[in-house]
Amino acid sequence: MNARYLPYLLILPVTLFLCLFFLYPFILVAQQAFSVDGGWSLKNFEDVIGYWKFPISFQNTMLLAAAVVPVQLALALLMATMVNRMKKGRDLILYVWTIPLGISDLAAGIIWLAIFEQSGFLNSMMQAVGAIDRPTNFLSYQNPGIVFLAIALAEIWRATAIMLVILVAGIGLIPKEYYEAAEVFGASPWKRFTRVTLPLLRPSLQTALVLRVILAFEIFAVVAALGGTLFPVLMGETYAYQFDLLNNGAAAAMALIILAISIAFTLIIMRALRVPKGATI
Amino acid sequence: MTHRFKLAGAAALALTMGASVAQADVLFWSTQAKPVEEAQAMREQVLGNFSDKVDYQPNDGGPWLTRLQAELQAGSGTIGVLGALHGDFSAMDPENLVDLSDLGVMSSSDTFNNLAKLGTDDAQYIPWMQASYIMAANKKALEHLPEGADIDALTYEQLIAWAANVHEATGEAKFGFPAGPKGLKHRFFQGYLYPSYTNGVVRTFASDAAVTAWEDFRKLWAHTNPASTNFSFLQEQLLSEDVWIAFDHTSRLAQAFNERPDDFVAFPAPAGPTGRGFMPVIAGVAIPKTAPDMDAAKALVAHMLKPETQIATLKATNFFPVVDVALPDDLPPAVQAAGGAVAKMSGAADANPGLLPAGLGSKGGDFNRVFVDAFERIVLANQDIRTVLDDQKGALEAIMNETGAPCWAPDAPSEGACPVE
């Protein structure tokens, strides 16, 4: 076996798999989005963008991502540095913190629904301590702010761990010598964090942010469980086109719009957090 | 040792599974009787005494259609018989369904038999069972009925006053409306509110009478449990007493009557200025052209229409027979209560039935969305009624023109596509 071809041979199965189950369906979806009655057309895109709920669901999706991702980033950084400093019980803490990662997003939504709904834990707790006279319904159309807050909380609880795992691995890769040198020159812990950890964590931050932001644009099940139809998001509208209206073309167009947004943000993050040429850890 | 047992078990399982596939049961692919108890009752009580073995598989509308379309596109399939609502069938191409006119069975209602032709000359499906939407109330609410109101002949005005009385007496809004994501709110607007106020659905969508209808609905909404936007099966809220007065599909109220028959009453929907609008629901059985065993499938369709099967279906699903049968006395409380309310509703002097939308093809979902959007904008977002109706009118017109669907009752008949006036 010629060693030159070995790498190509080794990635062949996964390439084939991706072509068959990602690239091919993607081409079909794109075709569906751009065709109406067999001819090329932008009608599907005009329809979904012209629908009165599109601006609302677009805005909601963006707002949610803008509210959730920075909090998650800060939390994940904090948690990762804490874990890194631990001598004992590090694994145990990591396991506990990543439990939400193992729960499906719909299940996570239902867990938080059990807290916030009219007969939920929050209501019974507040009633027990005498804060309210009778159970109130937090997740109603009258309280859009609380619906938003509940969804954001559930998302933060559920999906911070994915960033945490990537950042913990990244921090572990930073050589101890940099910290020792910084300490010798009298850098405070905060300085060490901003001048050593953050710059050297760039590649991991990039990966974590890209993954998290893309997932934030795809948010669906948590919103469906907590907000129902009160909080329309892009993915929920896509689902409605496909399964309520049986309009494959419009659903495909929505999927492509979400894809375009994801690609745009991926490029922005890659560019903003790029590692300068020649620089290595 | 245990490992070997597991292997043997797996092998045995594989063998039995292989055997059951080889036996080729008739696959009954249905959107109805989805709850586990109903599906089990279908398998045991309704399909148990059919000559062949039947594999009854209920599913949600989306997956149901996806698999069916995949089989039709592939040109070969495993589904023997389809069970679904009229709307599901009308969204399909009649070419894909086997003509069933020569089967010799049909329902006793000409309206239903005509609907089942899906605009062709032959029966594309056979009406299988029927239901409707009714009102139900906790008996505690009865003392708050407005003076002079007869619960079996309520008007919308009286219903609003009643809900307001209950609201005042209990301090809570206790009217319940199925406005949840899976709730059937659009049917209330299409079959109840619009016929009762405007004597139409499509023609009168943006009329002045429609504005009055939405104004009155807003008044009712003021006394509606605000959590209604999460309610899809009102039986749950009736049982938890979050709701005292409710509107929903008979089968979505059944559990309340069956669990506590002495606590609830069923009664007809209210009447408006143009009569007592109500909508019959109809489910049918059909055979896709890709059915593997056509004779067995036809025999199963005929079996579903036998009087004794129809009564068994009624007990299993709370959907009523479509053929003339003598109902036995030992029916579950929900069936008795709903049956009475439906009979009073359709027999009322001012009855104004609003038929299911017909001829919309695959645009049925878009048609429903026009009404759901109007509700979300007028009632939830509190937008101006006239503006919303004029805006939604465009979407409705586009659907009617694209499908060319003629008007259905209570709209006056039209030549060509039903116009929005």
Image (tube, rainbow, N blue to C red):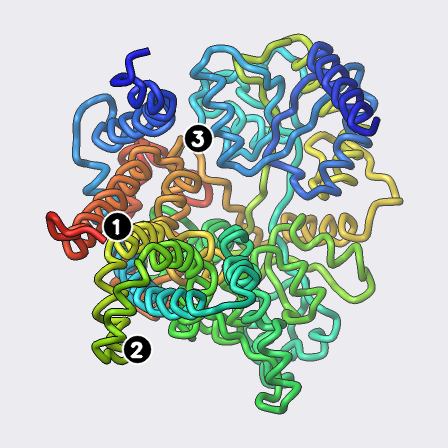
In the rendered structure, find residue A189 and report the number of the disc placed on it.
Answer: 2
- Residue B302 in picture, x, y percent from top left: 70, 18
Answer few, some or many: residues within 10 Å of disc 2's Cα (few below 14, many 20 plus, some between 14 and 19). few
| Residue at the disc numbered 3 | B91
Residue A215 visible, this angle: yes
Q: Nearer the viewer, residue A34 or A1?
A: A1
Q: Is residue A174 above or below residue A133?
A: above
A114 left or right, relative to A200: right
Under mark 3, the amino acid is Ala
Q: Residue furthest bottom?
A: A130
Q: CA distance from mark 1 to mark 2?
A: 52 Å
Q: Residue at x 36, y 46 (%)?
A: B202
Under circle 3, the secondary element is loop
Under circle 2, the secondary element is helix
| Residue at the disc numbered 1 | A51
Under circle 1, the secondary element is loop
B183 left or right, relative to A30: right
Q: State yes or no: discs 2 and 3 in contact (Cβ < 8 Å).
A: no
- Residue B168 in picture, x, y percent from top left: 59, 85
Q: Residue furthest left?
A: A277
